[in-house]
Image (cartoon, rainbow, N blue to C red):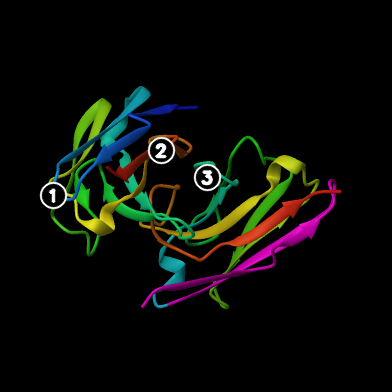
Amino acid sequence: EVQLLESGGGLVQPGGSLRLSCVASGFTFNNYGMNWVRQAPGQGPEWVSAVSGSGESTYYADSVKGRFTISRDNSKNTLYLQMSSLRVEDTAVYYCAKDRWSTKPAHFDYWGQGTLVTVSS
Amino acid sequence: EIVLTQSPGTLSLSPGERATLSCRASQSLSSSYLAWYQQKPGQAPRLLIYGASSRATGIPDRFSGSGSGTDFTLTISRLEPEDFAVFYCQQYGSSPTFGQGTKVELK
């Protein structure tokens, strides 16, 4: 059974930093791309970032480029999202999502339960 | 950025009825790179359809997708009580984007 377990969310002030983690199990982790998708309260999902199965290629939405960094540790089956220069508009539930592809971001067949990030003073 | 526009915003139907949801892309999607998701309150989205018409693992055959280019449709042939939710389309021809959603509610 595929499982994705996020952690690291919380309350942070504007301009602050936070690191999210996602531990994966139930599939061969390095065979698949992984993504972060966020959803602000009452809004639709927004794709944030992706990393290829090997970790060599990364992709970012324009809204987070230069502020967020995605990475993965295939030896630990873990995905990360380092978030810095956080803004109020980054407030959302952040989901870790497994891709059906191994390279560029595509579509997401398994999702975690989400972790809430709140940016507020 | 490819913008996806979903219609209608809300669909009020009864169990057993047919639901037809539309998704229109601002640019033609190469290789029909279009997916559909269902989301219930307090839950993560669930992948229903990818490649415009392929059902994801475990998805009942009452869910079907069709379309190409810029116009896509999700059809639920006969609504079951557990189908009432918000549905999103998502494109992956370029940097992924989602539509704003269609809520299928109980009439």
Frontmost residue, B67 versus B78: B78
In magenta stretch: residue A112: no
Identity of the residue drawn at 40% across and 38% down: B101
What is the crowding at mark 3: few (fewer than 14 residues within 10 Å), some, or many (at least 20)? many
Q: Quadrant of residue A98?
A: bottom left
Which residue is tagged 1?
A: B16
Q: Taking B87 as reference, is A75 above or below it?
A: below
| Secondary structure of the residue carrying numbered label 1 | loop
Identity of the residue drawn at 31% across and 38% down: B33
Please identify, in this view, whether the residue under mark 3 or under mark 2 is nearer the observer. Answer: 2
The number of numbered discs placed on residues in the rendered structure image is 3
Which residue is tagged 3?
A: A47
Residue B55 at what x, y percent from top left? 21, 53
Which residue is tagged 2?
A: B101
Residue at the farthest front position? B107
Identify the main secondary structure in magenta.
strand
Amino acid type at circle 3 is Trp
Q: Are marks 3 and 2 on the same chain?
A: no
| Chain where mark 3 sits | A
Q: Are marks 2 and 1 on the same chain?
A: yes
| Secondary structure of the residue carrying numbered label 3 | strand
A62 sits left or right of B62 in the view: right
